[in-house]
Amino acid sequence: MAESALELTGFSAYHGAMPAVRDVDLRVERGAVVGILGPNGAGKSTLLAATAGFLRSTGGISIGGVDATRLSSHRRRREGLAMVPQQQAVVAELSVGENLRLSWLTGKRGQRFEEVRDLALATFPALVTRLDEPAGNLSGGQRQMLAVSRGLMATCDVLLLDEPTAGLSPKLIGELAAAIRSLNEAGLTVLLVEQNVSVVERTCAHVHVLNGGRIVWNGPLSEVDRERIGDLYAGIDIHGVA
C-alpha cells in the first residue's frame, strides 16, 4: 500500500453542538489527487475546514503519518497541510507579491522562498506582471490563481482545495484543472472539493461522494459514471447496481 499523506479516521466536524459531518474515514495516498463530490449542503466545505483545523472536530487525523488530532490549524500548516478556501483566499489590500511572501512565512518553509515562488509563477504566468499590484485589482480568475499559489507558497505536502473553479469561465476552469494536474505531476498531493464533475474527471483518479454529512460512496472514478453520481446525490444507494 502506498504511503498515506493524509488520513481521517472516524472524523466528525461541528458547527456548534451538532455534527455537520459524521464518522468520515478517508485516506489520501501520497502523490494522489482525490476528489470529494456532493450536493449543496452535503458538508464538503465543512469537512475541509475541519481537516485544516478551522472548525471543531472529533476523531483522528494524521498528516504524513504524524498524529495531528490535537494540533491547531497553524501547527497543521507547519506539518505540511495547507487549505485554499472558496472565499477570502487572498488579502486584497496586499500586493500579489506580499500575498505570496506572507503565505510562505506562515507555512512549512520547506523550500527557499524564491524557489517556490518561481514554481507558482511558472504555473500561473498571468501573475508575473502583477506582483506589485494590490490583489484586490485582480480579476476573479487571477484571484483564484493567486489563491492556489498561496497554497503552494506554504510549501505544503497536501493541498486542500475548496471549489477552486466556482464562478469561473469555462476557459479558466480548463486552465485551473490543467494547473492542478501539472502540480500533481510535480509531486503535490491534493484533496479537491468540487461541484463541477468535469473538473474531477480531469484531475482525480479516486473520488468520495459526501451526502448528508456522510461518505456514501468512494472508489476509483472509473467505477462510477455521472448517472450514478446523480443517484448518490439523490440519496439512492448504487451498491450492487450493475
Image (spheres, rainbow, N blue to C red):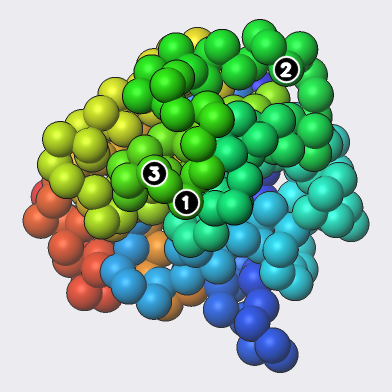
What type is the residue that disc 3 sits on? Leu
Question: Which secondary structure lies at badge 2?
Answer: helix
Q: CA distance from mark 3 to mark 1?
A: 6 Å
- Marks 3/2: CA–CA distance: 22 Å
Closer to us: 222 or 42: 42
Give the x, y percent position of residue 113. 73, 17
Eye-nearest disc, 1 or 2: 1
* Image coords of residue 114 (percent x, y): 68, 12
Residue at the (42%, 21%) spot, across then down: 129
Residue marked by disc 1? 136
Where residue 13 appears, as percent x and y from the top left, is 65, 71
Residue under pointer 3: 138
Q: Position of residue 81 (x, y in %)?
A: 70, 39
Of residue 26 and residue 241, the one placed in the foreground of this image is 26
| Kind of residue sitting beneath label 1 | Gly
Camera-side residue: 221 or 68? 68
User: Where does the N terminus fall, quadrant-wise?
Assistant: top right
Residue occupying the point 60% across, 30% down: 97
Q: Locate residue 7: give its quadrant.
A: top right
Looking at the image, residue 62 sits to the left or right of residue 38; the answer is right
Please name the residue that numbered disc 2 is placed on.
113
Examine the rendering and report whether any part of residue 90 can be seen. yes
First reached walking from the N terminus: tag 1 or tag 2: 2
Secondary structure at badge 3 equals loop
Task: Give SS at disc 1.
Answer: helix
Question: Which numbered disc, 3 or 2, marks the residue that appears first in the sequence?
Answer: 2
Q: Is residue 115 left or right of residue 237?
A: right
Kind of residue at disc 2: Phe
